[in-house]
């Protein structure tokens, strides 16, 4: 029963954090908000759990700070926004099914190679 209660509480907390995240994104200047929304859509494509809010909040903080300093979007994400997103996602391998499966594949091939 405690596990169920803890899980429900975690889900509620994540939902509250996500609502705050979306509110904060809407408060960004339009180009920054649009870019965060595009990155969010991309990142959610690889989400493995509700812990993705951590990843999204990191992206948001980067854009909030950059917007406050009027940093151009391309200076934030670089030439390839996919690479930008993947670098951030790589910091959260347990929350992303794609990175998890990449790791498993590399590990399996290494095991086979050494057997």
Image (cartoon, grey):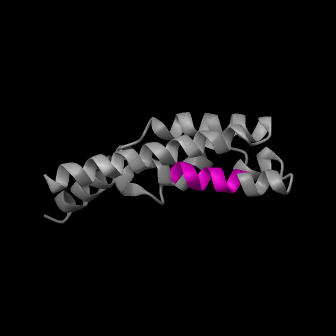
Residue 7, how many percent across, how many down? 26, 50
Along the line of sight, which residue is nearer the eye, 111 or 43? 43
Q: Using residue 2 as the reference point, say whether residue 87 is left or right of it.
A: right
Residue at figure coordinates x 57%, y 47% from the top left: 85
Along the line of sight, which residue is nearer the eye, 113 or 33? 33
**Residue 39 magenta-highlighted:** no
Residue at figure coordinates x 73%, y 41% from the top left: 27
Residue at figure coordinates x 38%, y 45% from the top left: 12
Residue at figure coordinates x 18%, y 66% from the top left: 114
Which image quadrant is residue 81 in?
A: top right
Residue 33, how many percent across, how many down? 71, 38
Residue 65, how many percent across, how many down? 75, 58
Q: How many dots with numbers?
A: 0
Q: Using residue 44 as the reference point, say whether residue 8 is left or right of it.
A: left
Whether 19 is drawn above or below 89: the answer is: above
Name, please, the residue furthest toward the bottom: 114
Residue 77, how many percent across, how many down? 70, 48
**Residue 60 magenta-highlighted:** yes
Whether 88 is drawn above or below 33: the answer is: below
Regarding residue 89, the answer to whether it shows in the image is no
Regarding residue 11, the answer to whether it shows in the image is yes
Q: Quadrant of the C terminus?
A: bottom left
Q: Using residue 2 as the reference point, say whether residue 41 is left or right of it.
A: right
Magenta highlight range: 55-63
Query: Please, what is the dominant secondary structure of the magenta stretch?
Result: helix
């Amino acid at each position: 029963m405690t596990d169920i209660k803890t899980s429900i509480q975690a889900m509620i907390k994540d939902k509250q954090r996500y609502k705050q995240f979306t509110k904060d994104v809407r408060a960004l200047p339009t180009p920054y908000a649009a870019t965060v929304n595009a990155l969010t859509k991309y990142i959610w494509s690889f989400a493995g759990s509700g812990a993705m809010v951590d990843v999204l909040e990191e992206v948001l903080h980067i854009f909030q700070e950059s917007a406050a300093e009027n940093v151009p979007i391309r200076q934030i994400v670089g030439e390839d926004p996919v690479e930008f997103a993947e670098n951030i996602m790589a910091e959260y391998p347990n929350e992303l099914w794609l990175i998890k499966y990449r790791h498993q594949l590399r590990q399996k091939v290494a095991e086979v190679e050494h057997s």
